[in-house]
Amino acid sequence: MTVNTLIPLFALLTSLLASVIIFALPEKGHRLRTSVNLAAAGVKLILVGIMVWGIFQGQSFEFAFTMLPGVQFVLRADALSMLFAGLSAVLWLLTTIYAVGYLEDSPNRSRFFGFFSLCVASTMGIALAGNLFTFFLFYEMLTLSTYPLVVHRGTRQALRAGRNYIIYTLTGGAVLLLAIAWLHGLVGDLPFRPGGHFSGLEPDLQGPLTLVFVLLIAGLGVKAALVPLHGWLPQAMVAPAPVSALLHAVAVVKAGAFGIVRVVCEIYGLEAANQMGLLTGLAVVAAITIIYGSTRALYQVDLKRRLAFSTISQVSYIVLGVSLFGPVGVAGGLVHLVHQGIMKITLFFCAGNYAETLGVHRIDELDGAGRRMPGTSVAFTLGAFGMIGAPPLAGFVTKWTMGTGALAVGMDWVVAVLVVSSVLNAAYFLPILHRIWFAGQQQAWPHERRWGRLETSAWLLWPPLITAAALIVIGLLASMPFSPLSWVNLIVEQEVMQ
């Protein structure tokens, strides 16, 4: 057993060990808890960086053992897994910093950060899973570890949201398990591999595999918030802002979208899925979700609910991209996994800052917030323009790449979807920016707190400033080596278009 064999396991165990330590700490152990959180996040980032560099150099990283007859537990690092794992490792470090400041005076912090670390471990397991069985284990572990975070505040509204969340996600998990078991019965244990397994498909298997595909997408589509399986997501916005950031940018919805990418590209394979006529239906569902989410966002007066419906729309860009049977369109969908995560975590960090500093939750309470909180408001503005697709921000790179890819394969209607979505994005973000920067303050803030000369706590201010700056850098340097787009092009070349 080599060091490379153990690194994926260590990347997973880092957060699991941290959760055990944090659960054991007393509520008053604030400094030690913070140290454990930050140390675990830092070590995980280093381990992921080692795997990224190793994959770039052609090394392999895999830990596996037989768990059941005919079924293996596999943790494997490849270019696609590192796209998700790298995003998770970077954003989780920033979310940890943010959560420490956000929950400074809150009760039950050991419980929160214990489940928080379990959630990190679950997401890393999803990223590194080498087959559907391993993926499912961590997918359900993610459901169970995020439920206590959703209901953390313990209010009636939080408990109701948590109940809906667990009903939706466990039902989706049951459908996913049925599909995985059926697939295993048809063809055995299938590892994720470039090009998938079903090129040259036997005709008598096409019908059952089509039904299995529908079940797989339905099970994964709950967490990915595909219409009509999205109902849990807006309700879950009663959770604290760090949890909302996790749900939307790093963990739950991304886990669903990433699972769909794995199924389409590395279980079925794009060529086989296209020949079976599966990609067109998936693209239509994604397009409907994009327009529906953006339209519903227009009518939300609560800031986090508007961002939630925005997420429903934006995550489906990933699904739409992998439904385009061409390298450029697929690259656009995959790179949005990173771009949307950074944009959305910026927006939720800022929404949390407005709530924690000013007591503001509604959009009509934001009048004049830009003058009171300029740093937070600049970050929110950059995140919003990124979502709209304004150059040179990361969101523009996504939409340009996907539009070019759609035209290359003759799917002109996808460009129309992108244009309509961008118009709707502008329609629900620009009025917020107008209130923040141009409207005068009409009334006192609902619940204002001050941190000396800073507009808010440094723990809360720096994370959105860093992620907002990243949106500019990623957009400007999109063609540079090790940019998300360059890494995605490597994935498409080596693992997807086989």
Image (tube, rainbow, N blue to C red):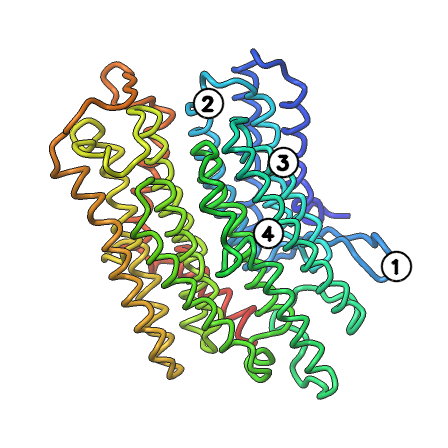
Q: Residue furthest top?
A: 28
Query: Mark 2 against mark 3, which lies toward the viewer?
Result: 2
Residue under the point 31% across and 55% down:
477
User: Is residue 361 placed above or below 88 in the rendered structure?
Assistant: above
Residue under the point 39% across and 62% down:
290
Separation of residues labelled 3 and 1 (CA atoms): 28 Å
Separation of residues labelled 2 and 1 (CA atoms): 45 Å
Separation of residues labelled 3 and 4 (CA atoms): 14 Å
Name the element at disc 2.
loop
Image coordinates for residue 191, horizontal then vertical, percent? 71, 64
The answer to which of marks 3 and 4 sits earlier in the sequence is 3
- Side (left or right) of 197 relative to 414: right
User: Is residue 194 placed above or below 57 in the rendered structure?
Assistant: below
Q: Which residue is mark 4?
A: 127
Separation of residues labelled 1 and 4 (CA atoms): 24 Å
The answer to which of marks 1 and 4 sits earlier in the sequence is 1
**Kind of residue at badge 2:** Leu
Residues at badges 2 and 1 in contact (C-beta under 8 Å)?
A: no
Name the element at disc 4.
helix
Query: Mark 2 against mark 1, which lies toward the viewer?
Result: 2
Image coordinates for residue 356, horizontal then vertical, percent? 35, 25
> Label 4 neighbourhood size at 10 Å, few (<14), some (14-19), many (20+)?
many
- Side (left or right) of 488 relative to 421: right
**Kind of residue at badge 3:** Leu
Name the element at disc 1.
loop
Name the element at disc 3.
helix
The answer to whether any part of residue 129 appears in the image is yes
Q: Which residue is mark 2?
A: 103
The quarter holding residue 368 reads top left
Query: Mark 3 against mark 4, which lies toward the viewer?
Result: 3
The answer to whether any part of residue 38 appears in the image is no
Disc sitting over residue 69 in the figure:
1
